Amino acid sequence: MTTGPVLRVDTAGHIPPYEQIRAQLTALIASGRLPEGERLPTVRQLASDLGLAPGTVARAYRELEATGLIRTRRGAGTRVAAPPEGPPRPDPARLGALVRDFTSAARDLGADDATILEAVRKALGPAPQ
């Protein structure tokens, strides 16, 4: 990935850097811009490139491994894994973390619970029949 897509991290934003890395790599893998077998930078290299602590990148990689999007093997490095079979299932812990981050950011904007719920309902669109 050294000549591939560039990741960007906003360290001043509400979204933790590890989550930004995880989300960007997930999108790149889902879009096919990072194909199966593509080697990712080492934790140390990506941390250095982004000006982050290695633990931040390691956490993003751990979460990507937990969802089956990447795999790390001693001597072979970290590579994009084969696409999972069947529809993806959300990780409850990760979903909970995203909800907490969203609600915290919404409250920072001054939104109350009713306003937050209404925004989520609008974002979800009409209920399936």
Image (cartoon, helix red, strand yellow):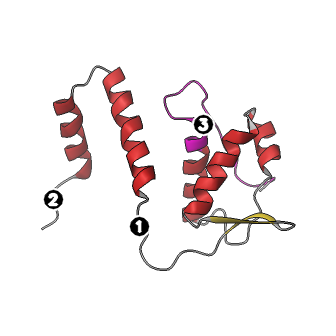
- Residue 125 point in image, percent of width and height: 21, 52
Residue at mark 3: 17
- Residue 5 point in image, percent of width and height: 70, 52
- Residue 54 point in image, percent of width and height: 75, 40
Q: Amino acid at mark 1?
A: Arg
Q: Residue at x 74, y 55 (%)?
A: 4
Task: Kindly give the residue lying farthest to the left in the view shown.
Answer: 129
- Residue 107 point in image, percent of width and height: 31, 25
Residue at mark 1: 89
* Residue 78 left/right relative to 65: right
Residue range corresponding to the magenta coloring: 2-20
Q: Amino acid at mark 3?
A: Pro
Secondary structure type for disc 2: loop
| Residue 127, numbered label | 2
User: What is the CA distance from the residue labelled 1 to the residue labelled 2?
Assistant: 20 Å
Q: Residue at x 81, y 37 (%)?
A: 48
Mark toward the viewer: 1 or 2: 1
Mark toward the viewer: 2 or 3: 3
